[in-house]
Image: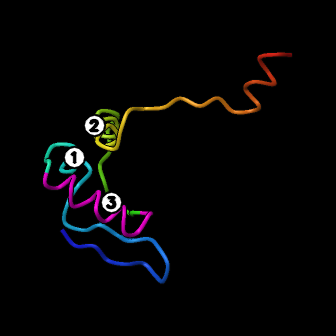
Amino acid sequence: MDVIPLGPGFGAEIRGVTLADVAARDATYAAVRAAFEDHSVLVFRNQDVTDDIQLSFSRRFGPRKSQKSARWERDRIS
């Protein structure tokens, strides 16, 4: 896996692994998590992302949280 900084401050491109790799492999997740802690924003280019891959990848970073927008609250009350 390669971590390519995108510029000064924050942000990096991840090369050599897919979102599915991160979801399936503990060592890959640990490396990506460390890159996230170092760079705050990660870019994975040209990924084939299914709903299952997106959910599996996201679950590695913690449980899903639902948030309601202020507009949703306003519309619900009206």
Pointer 2 local density, CA inside 10 Å: few below 14, some 14–19, many at least 20: some
Look at the magenta stretch and give its main secondary structure.
helix
Stretch in magenta: 27-41
Residue appearing at x 22%, y 52% in the figure:
29
User: Local crowd at mark 1 within 10 Å, few (<14), some, or many (≥20)?
Assistant: some
Q: Which mark is nearer the camera, 3 or 1?
A: 1
Q: Is residue 78 left or right of residue 33?
A: right
Q: Is residue 40 magenta?
A: yes
**40 vs 22: above or below:** below
Residue type at the position of mark 2: Ser
| Residue for badge 3 | 46
Q: Return the x and y of residue 47 as percentages of the image width and height.
A: 31, 54
Q: Position of residue 35 (x, y in %)?
A: 31, 65
- Give the number of the disc on residue 68: none
Tell us which disc is closer to us: 3 or 2.
Answer: 2
Q: Dot 1 corresponds to which residue?
A: 20
Question: Marks 3 and 2, how far apart in space?
Answer: 18 Å
For the point 14% across and 48% down, the residue is 26
**SS at circle 3:** loop
Residue contact at pointers 2 and 1, CB within 8 angstroms: yes
Q: Earlier in the sequence, mark 3 or mark 2?
A: 3
